[in-house]
Amino acid sequence: MNVTNIANLYASLQTTSVSSGSKVSRSFEQAASRLESELQSTQVKISAYGQVKAGFAGIEAAGQTLAKGDKISAADTKKALQSLVDAYNQTRSAAAGTEAGYATNAANSLRRAVASSGMNDELQALGIMRGSDGSLALDTKKLDAALAADKGAVQKAAASLGGAMQSVATRALSENSGINRTLESLNTRASALEGQQSGIASLIELQQRTSSSYGASSGISSYLSIFRM
C-alpha cells in the first residue's frame, strides 16, 4: 500500500466541496483498514516465530539437562526426555505456520538430526517413536522398563539424542541467526505500522472537525512524513 500517494490525493482535495470531503473520509477509513490488516498479518508472523524460538529454547534446556548423563536421577532423565519431545513437536508445528524461510529451514535441520540413521538405536532405547506426520511420542512404560534394566545405557542414549537436538537449537537461537533477524525485522515492521495507524487516526480526527473541506490550515502536509518508510 502506498500511503504517501493516498495522502497526496487528500492534499489535492484541499479546496473541494463537502461531497469531496466525504471522499477524503472514505479514503482515510480505507487506509486505516488496510493498515490494520497489514498489522494483524505481521503480528501473526511475530507470534509464529516467537513460538518457534520458544520451542528451540525448550529443546536447548532439555538437551543441557540430558547432557549430564548419569549425574542426574532417572526421574529427571524421564522428565527432560518428555520436555525434549514436547519442545520438538512444538517447534515443528510452529515452523509449519510460517512462510518458507529461516524457521522452516531450522525445523528441517532439527528433523534431519532426529531422523539420521545414527539416532535409530537411541530412539528405540528411549521408547521414542516417530509418527507418520513426523512428530515424536514418548512411550513412558518402555522408558521406565529401560531405566530399570540399565539406567546408565538409557542416560547415555538420552545424552546423545539431546546433544544432537541441542546443537541445532543453539544455532537457531544464536544472536545473529536468521530466526532472530527475521523476528527483529517483523517487530520493526509492526512498530512502523502502528506509527502509521496513529497518523491516520490523527488525520481522521482532523477531517471530522472540518465542516466542508481541507484547507491549508488542516496541516495535512505535516503528516506526510508519517507514511514514509
Image (tube, grey):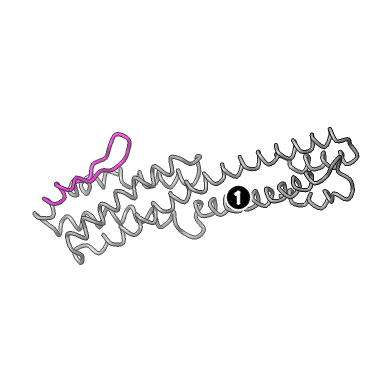
| Pointer 1 residue | 190
Disc tally is 1
Q: Is residue 61 magenta?
A: no
- Residues in magenta? 127-145
| Placement of 164 over or under 137, stated as above or below | below
Q: Quadrant of residue 139?
A: top left
User: What residue is drawn where x is 34% and y is 48%?
Assistant: 88
Foreground residue among 198 and 174: 198
**Residue 10 x/y as whole percent:** 82, 40
In the picture, residue 80 is in which quadrant?
bottom left
Looking at the image, residue 165 lies above or below residue 64:
above
Give the percent coordinates (x, y) of residue 217: 88, 50
Q: Pick whichever, 222 or 208, lies toward us.
A: 208
On the image, the x and y values in percent for residue 56 come to 39, 53
In the figure, is residue 54 to the left or right of 7?
Answer: left
Which part of the image, by quadrant, shows the N terminus?
A: top right
Q: Is residue 136 magenta?
A: yes
User: For the residue marked with disc 1, what is the amino acid?
Assistant: Ala
Image coords of residue 84 (percent x, y): 30, 52
Residue at the spot x=74%, y=45% of the render?
204
Residue at (41% x, 53% y) in the render: 54
Residue that sits furthest to the bottom in the current view: 71
53 sits left or right of 70 in the view: right
| Label 1: few (<14), some (14–19) or many (≥20) C-alpha neighbours in 10 Å | some
Helix, strand or loop for disc 1: helix
- State whether residue 42 is above or below residue 163: above
